[in-house]
Amino acid sequence: MNKPALTVSEAVASRSSKRAFLDTPVSATQVREILAKAQRAPSGGNLQPWIVHVLGGTELARFRTMMRERRAVNAMGEGAEYPIYPEHLVEPYRARRGQCGEDMYATLGITRENKAARIEFIGGNFDFWNAPVALFVCIDRTLGATQWVDLGLYLQTVMLLAREVGLDTCAQEFWTLWHKTVAEFLSLPENVMPFCGMALGYADPAHPVNDLRTARAPLEESVIFHGLSL
């Protein structure tokens, strides 16, 4: 018997960034259905600014081979095309980011002092954490910050639709560090910029890192009600 689909609330509650995937295949049909439904994601003026490249099978293997070759020559990457975080991250954001990293490494038993182990683990980004499907979400360079917001709406829609059918994801802004290689592999025109990657597949339930549940601030820290009696 097929398991019932998750409700929206269940999909939101169960979604988290997974950093270890099983090699269980995901069918092209299933990926296509998720992305077809995600076309309903909202965007200002209905611009639909997302441009998505999907890699799997031999093409994903070819990309991974290219990355191993590029890393051997230049381990530090090509430099971010956009700042992932502000240079001077203020509170409370700095503390939240730091706590997220500490909580993640704690699931693996990696101490703050063990820099080599931390670097080795985070290198899993290069393999999309072993996921069988990889997405690259791109955007036209002529578009502005508001359309980047639209990309976020699209990404969340994809992630929740994946949860609905029992799949997991990990969005990766990491790939802006290798934007030239990504653009070359995908044969992107000059006006199209790789924004981020996304790993898609079945999370490994036995891997401790997938037990990570990052903390969320109390509602009162983020939401102010006006004119509503609670």
Image (cartoon, rainbow, N blue to C red):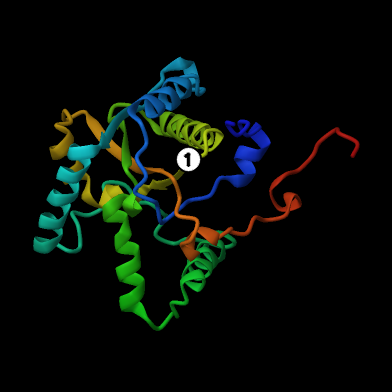
Front residue of 134 and 175: 134
Residue 180 visible at all: no
Residue 32 in picture, x, y percent from top left: 37, 24
Work out which residue is located at the far front of the displayed protein and give it: 1
Residue 148 visible at all: yes
Work out which residue is located at the far bottom of the displayed protein and give it: 113
- Mark 1 closeness class: few <14, some 14–19, many ≥20 residues within 10 Å: some
Which residue is found at the position 58% from the left and 58% from the top?
A: 213
Q: Secondary structure at mark 1?
A: loop
Which quarter of the image is occupied by the C terminus? top right
Which residue is found at the position 40% from the left and 83% from the top?
A: 113
Which residue is found at the position 18% from the left and 54% from the top?
A: 78
- Classify residue 20 by image quadrant: bottom left
49 sits to left or right of 18:
left
208 sits to left or right of 119:
right
- Classify residue 11 by image quadrant: top right
72 sits to left or right of 101:
left
What's the residue type where badge 1 is placed?
Leu
Q: Which residue is mark 1?
A: 167
Residue 197 in picture, x, y percent from top left: 33, 42
Residue 1 in picture, x, y percent from top left: 59, 31
Work out which residue is located at the far right of the displayed protein and give it: 229
Residue 122 in picture, x, y percent from top left: 34, 63
Which residue is found at the position 24% from the left and 30% from the top?
A: 192
